[in-house]
Amino acid sequence: MQRILSKPAKIGTYHQDDVLFLLKDLSDIELEDTAVNRETKIQSGGHYSESLPIEYQPPKEYVELFWDTLQHNKQKVALCVGIVSEQIYQLKGSNAVLVSLARAGTPVGILIKRYLKFKYALSLPHYSISIIRDKGIDENALHYIQQEHPNGIIQFVDGWTGKGAISLELTKACRQYEQKYRIKLDDTLAVIADPGCCTTLFGTREDFLIPSACLNSTVSGLVSRTVLNEALIGKDDFHGAKFYQNLLEEDVSNEFIKTISEEFPTIAVEAKESALRLLSRKIETGLLGLNDVKKIQSEFLIQSTHLIKPGVGETTRVLLRRVPWKILMRDPSSPFVKHILMLAQEKGVTVEAYPNMKYLCCGLIKKVKGKQT
């Protein structure tokens, strides 16, 4: 394996001891396009990673809802972070290297790092790297981590699971990496919430709102989604991303981390007890959420499961950066879907009652035809 010459990009507003981004800085390049144009290209055979959506800037009421949700859910999020952190500590100890999947995984990786430092005075290395559905993981980033931590044991981290597309992509990528380089990686994905039953390493399997899902880059260190565009990313480059410095005044990334971290002392005992209970029993996976997805696909005559995004986090993403068709809602009275109802009303998207599903809600993407501007 050749020595990697690329270095972590100095992007984002997180502290450097919280995370290093193994990404190529594309901040000076115009990559944004409208949701309709992007959707048309994606559904015509293009790939979502070749461009970026225009960053949604929410109204004041929506930002206030984010803060209300954060205050309401902060202890629950902290507990779930603690539970998954304790499992990582029991399984891998001081040899663990946290590798979060940019970008939803980045704040979660930071929280896990902070929890383990608080609880065990253990400062684990933490990197954020790119994985892209149907394209795979950034192998140059993995090479860099192997080079820097030859005895480390990688622990992949993400925010939550939907129907399991990224979990499957990660498993496939780890298998290919082992075949190519004879280095075996643990493909177990650590998440706060696993409503899709995609992994054995989670804080909860409840489909609930992780407040960082409410916003885009302003709660993710002002870093964009990752980009893999052959015109910009060479064979020796890391995958790319942008740093939205123009949004510095709206950035709440470190306040989010601080708010959750302050709850760690109150949940630490329960987190360890819950983690040990989970580790003592056999956890079933089986991507059980896919049953709901296939049922929805059949009932609504949807061509591709790529147009079905189950769970609170994924439904939020549909409304923030795709072209939504409709939202299916199991329980509109849940406090975890207030922001979804607000976004749907703002964008004129139909919300339809759908009580018989595992997830709280599901976002359906509109089938678009022809070129639109």
Image: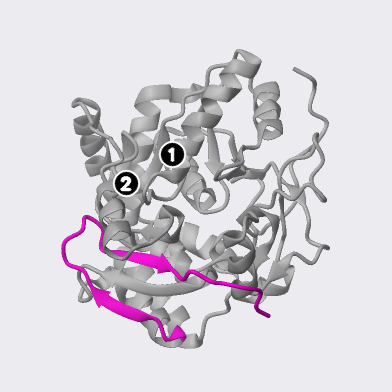
The front one of 90 and 141 is 141
Magenta residues, start to end: 347-373
Q: Residue furthest left?
A: 356
Image quarter hosting the C terminus: bottom right
Q: Nearer the viewer, mark 1 or mark 2?
A: 1
> Which of pointers 1 and 2 lies earlier in the amino acid sequence?
1
Please, what is the dominant secondary structure of the magenta stretch? loop
Q: Residue furthest top?
A: 182
Up/down of 372 relative to 357, above or below: below
Taking the spot 37% from the left edge, 23% from the top edge, the residue there is 91
- The alpha-carbon separation of the residues under discs 1 and 2 comes to 11 Å
Q: Which residue is mark 2?
A: 194
Picture disc at residue 167: 1
How would you rate the neighbour count of disc 2 (Cα within 10 Å): few for under 14, some for 14-19, many for 20 or more? many
The kind of residue on which mark 2 rests is: Asp
Quadrant housing residue 298: bottom left
> Dot 2 lies on which element?
loop
